[in-house]
Image: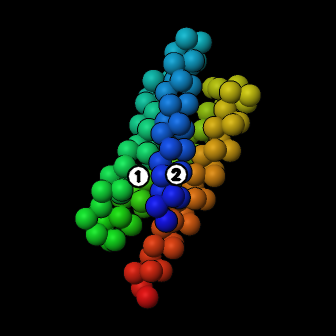
Amino acid sequence: MKSNAINIQDRTFEFACRIVKLYRYMVKQNRTNEALCRQLVRAGTSIGANLEEASAAQSRADFISKCNIALKEARETYYWLRLFKETEIIPVDRISGLTVECNEIVAILTSIVKKTRSRVED
């Protein structure tokens, strides 16, 4: 599990960097709805932050809790990306890769939470 944790931490850090760059692009293009942009940046950058906290968890239950928070933030980020795409706030070519990556992060985190929970129940 350690190698997956490192991989997902790296991926979510890179994802957060891409979210911040998207925000900077939106500001330059004057395509910002400040409230929506803040929501996207907050959710998109907190995924990795919660996984960093999970890596220092005090117990398996604490680990699951922090990973679950990261999963919820990833789902919220996916929502905001879809909303920006459908409302054409952000051009499709700028957002499609992020949407795919976010969906993959959701799938990975879902798997981590389910597998860790099943170990607790055993």
How busy is the neighbourhood of tag 1: few (under 14 within 10 Å), some, or many (20 plus)?
Answer: many
Mark 2 — residue?
8
Determine whether the residue tagged by mark 1 lies in a helix, strand or loop: helix
* Residue 32 can be seen in this image: no
How busy is the neighbourhood of tag 2: few (under 14 within 10 Å), some, or many (20 plus)?
Answer: some
> How far, Cα to Cα, is label 2 from label 1?
8 Å
What x and y, as percent, mark residue 10? 50, 44
Outermost residue, left side: 58
- Picture disc at residue 51: 1
Left or right: where 106 falls relative to 94: left
Check the image and report above or below for 46 versus 33: below
Q: Write the residue at 30% across / 66% down.
A: 62
Determine whether the residue tagged by mark 2 lies in a helix, strand or loop: helix
Q: Write the residue at 42% across / 61% down.
A: 68
Instruction: Tell me the amino acid under the disc marked 2.
Output: Ile
Check the image and report above or below for 89 versus 27: below
Q: Nearer the viewer, residue 83 or 97?
A: 97
- Picture disc at residue 65: none
Check the image and report above or below for 32 versus 102: above
Outermost residue, bottom side: 122
What x and y, as percent, mark residue 39? 45, 36
- Please state, as top left, top right, bottom left or bottom right, where the C terminus lies in the image: bottom left
* Residue 102 can be seen in this image: yes
Name which of mark 2 and mark 1 comes first in the sequence.
2
Q: Quadrant of residue 89?
A: top right
